[in-house]
Image (cartoon, coloured by chain):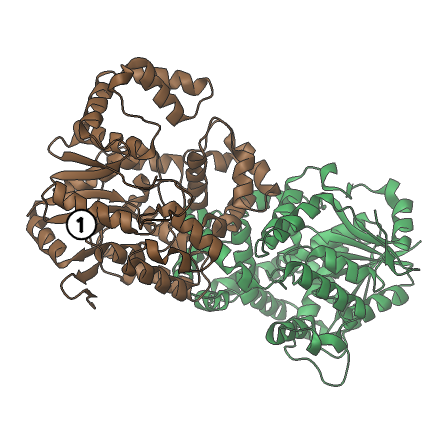
Chain colours: A green, B brown
């Protein structure tokens, strides 16, 4: 059996994702598709709109065979760390290929660029640091350094978000897992960050779907953009917990962190650097929304996304030293299994014996500080939910074994 | 001009309090009554039902001339520390007497008991420690030690809450401010902790009033037990902030603390001792309410009240070392003025020059770690309020100068 890997957030799962999974299987001639999915908090430093369990169900009902959690230590990170973590998990699961969507669509361009980067790595690093010192944000500096060091005719456009991610997947593959074959296809129809729902087609960006959900407060406007299974999971989650999570729901908790930590403690939090804690501390006492707060903190030096990640680390109180220690290892310390189809289950029973990394089905089976952070993330994620549902959801984390889906009957199996 | 002091929480201000203030002035033949009032969190470790500003207004409209805040470092403490802090502030404000209500009602009994205690202090301490080791809670151990060391015929009944507080006021006076004369009168009609509203009289306990407010969700049932000014302030607060604060409103924030602090950090919090942090950590993940959580933590060794105080210190993340440092001084480091009547203002202008302790009218006028804790308490207190009202209330802390009340016109003065 052959497996291909995809790296996803499914926030929420939409027709574009369904198309992507189908493509992944056909383009790579694979039997199963394995999704490495961010858990409670996402790469852009935002909470997921619904729990990882609801999103796992959406995925399984739409062609994904295995869903694993991308640990917090990789999930809420810049593209490079995010990609390295995801590739290490797909590698550990014996995937023979990785499939991603991109604005560019030509895998040769990614390979060329990654090779060029690897050759001139030090030179680019040096340039990047200089640009950062001049006041550019890290992604802007990296892109500019690239331009200066490498012949631009060979380059990917690294200002496009999916090109950046794809570049880091391919780079990670070249650096650490050369037996994985990378594939890409051009993303169709909608841009990653498109704010508005499109008028004449079914594929809309997850961003525009979340925005519509938030603005209209009902599922009606997004019905035609979401597969039935996604809609049902969103519906069920919303009626159980009375919430679709947004950053604003965590603002009081973030305030609590700032109110009760002194500057020295704030400085000990991962990614908090260069005195930004003073700026944040000042801003948060005056702001009455997360949006307002972040606008007060924003400077040219930091991207919005990076600031959001910093604030998620603050909300989670993730310490610098702890995170640096956990990121030292090149290989993900475990594979947390969230769900599988029957075919996925078959695949896992075949490769199980060859795995070098523990496969975690039940939280009680492994104790690891990175896994503790995933548990913490689940609990913090649940804080805005009213009681007793909040406790119900966090307790489920310990009771839920991976979700089993029977793709023939279309039913989830009771355990 | 002669001033008498009362130590209060006014949670909320009711007819019993009004009677107490009148008595204080007449029994001690004083011109002004100074109330030292707990701020955001109270002696039993609970949040106040409304802000200190609303409670200050209630007091001024009902015969109190000066309201000062009892700093957090004294307010959320066992009776002894609470009383010492309060007496030190009344002393600093040149009060010549202190008036308190008690179950006993005979000041001689208090003086006798306090003298006896001072004489046999070490012996009692020794006995108390032994009883605590045997598993008794501190108050129960202290009462038992008393019984054994001192002839019980001379004793106050120290199982009664207001006798305990009164005893500590008188003891503090004997130890540190012998020029203050203590007065007491028997509390009438209702017990301190009475749960039910009485049927045929106007004086109900604050506990029963809060309980009725919570259960009925309206002001109707309590109308006849509260002076008009109190009702109005409660009404106004509730319509501005859509909340009358209870401990349950802070439960998610307390969970956040536990989710994001490890055991070593929990152990560093003031009053967390003897491994109770493990018990708490375990209980909080399973409990879906504060009440349920505390029931799971409760043992014979700790009173409910002490556990509530511990959890308030956790919510505030008050560190052991910081608190121990702040409690070393025998004298309150400042007097925070919350409000005054015209007569109160006259009194203050008379004694102002003699004050040995800074009188804080505006927060910006003094920087002190104990004052920082008061500010922190205000901010934490406001967390359950929705935005933008939350920010409004916390910003007010810095803008509000003391409330001025004109007792002749019955109007608050605009500043």
Pick out the residue farthest to the front.
B200
- Spot occupied by residue B74 in the image (x, y as percentages of width and height): 30, 39
Disc count in the image? 1
Residue A10 shows in this picture: no
Residue that numbered label 1 is attached to: B359
Position of B344 with respect to B394 (left or right) is: left
Position of B306 with respect to A180 (left or right) is: left
Chain under label 1? B
Dividing the picture into quadrants, the one containing residue A312 is bottom right
Dividing the picture into quadrants, the one containing residue B156 is top left
Position of A330 with respect to B277 (left or right) is: right
User: Quarter of the image containing the C terminus of chain B?
Assistant: bottom left
Front residue of A127 and B234: B234
Q: In the image, what residue occupies the spot 68% across and 50% down? A: A71
Front residue of B365 and B250: B250
Q: In the image, what residue occupies the spot 34% across and 62% down? A: B395
Dividing the picture into quadrants, the one containing residue B397 is bottom left
At label 1, counting other C-alpha atoms closer than 10 Å, the crowd grade (few under 14, some 14-19, many 20 or more) is: some
- Spot occupied by residue B300 in the image (x, y as percentages of width and height): 49, 26
Position of A371 with respect to A254 (left or right) is: right
- Spot occupied by residue A213 in the image (x, y as percentages of width and height): 65, 72
Secondary element at image label 1: strand
Residue B157 shows in this picture: yes
- Spot occupied by residue A274 in the image (x, y as percentages of width and height): 44, 56
Say if A36 sits above or below B333 in the image: below
């Amino acid at each position: 059996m052959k497996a291909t890997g995809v790296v996803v957030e499914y926030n929420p799962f939409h027709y574009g994702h369904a198309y992507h999974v189908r493509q992944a299987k056909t383009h790579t001639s694979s039997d199963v598709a394995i999704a490495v999915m961010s858990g409670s908090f996402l790469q852009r430093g935002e909470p997921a709109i619904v729990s990882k369990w609801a999103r796992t169900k959406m995925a399984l009902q739409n062609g994904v065979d295995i869903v694993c959690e991308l640990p917090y230590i990789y999930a809420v990170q810049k593209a490079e760390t995010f990609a390295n973590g995801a590739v290490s998990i797909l590698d550990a699961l014996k995937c023979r290929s990785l499939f991603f969507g991109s604005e560019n669509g030509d895998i040769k361009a990614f390979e060329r660029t990654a090779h060029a980067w690897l050759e001139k790595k030090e030179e680019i690093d040096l340039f990047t640091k200089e640009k950062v010192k001049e006041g550019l944000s890290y992604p802007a500096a990296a892109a500019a350094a690239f331009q200066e060091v490498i012949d631009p005719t060979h380059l990917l456009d690294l200002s496009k978000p999916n090109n950046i991610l794809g570049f880091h997947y391919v780079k990670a593959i070249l650096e650490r897992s050369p037996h994985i074959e990378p594939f890409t296809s051009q993303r169709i129809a909608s841009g990653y960050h498109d704010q508005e729902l499109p008028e004449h087609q079914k594929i809309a960006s997850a961003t525009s779907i979340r925005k519509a959900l938030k603005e209209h407060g009902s599922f009606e406007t997004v019905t035609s953009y979401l597969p039935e299974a996604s809609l049902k999971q969103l519906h069920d989650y919303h009626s159980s917990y009375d919430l679709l999570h947004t950053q604003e729901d965590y603002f009081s908790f973030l305030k609590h962190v700032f109110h009760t930590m002194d500057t020295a403690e704030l400085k000990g939090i991962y990614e908090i650097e260069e005195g930004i804690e003073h700026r944040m501390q000042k801003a948060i006492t005056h702001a009455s929304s997360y949006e307002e707060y972040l606008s007060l903190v924003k400077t040219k030096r930091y991207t919005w996304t990076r600031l959001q990640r910093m604030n998620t680390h603050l909300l989670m109180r993730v310490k610098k030293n702890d995170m640096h220690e956990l990121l030292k290892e090149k290989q993900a310390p475990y594979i947390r299994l969230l769900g599988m189809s029957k075919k996925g289950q078959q695949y896992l029973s075949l490769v199980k014996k060859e795995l070098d990394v523990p496969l975690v089905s039940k939280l009680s089976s492994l104790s690891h500080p990175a896994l503790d952070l995933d548990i913490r993330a689940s609990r913090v994620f649940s804080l805005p939910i009213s009681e007793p549902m909040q406790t119900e959801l966090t307790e489920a984390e310990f009771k839920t074994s991976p979700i089993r889906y029977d793709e023939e009957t279309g039913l989830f199996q009771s355990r």
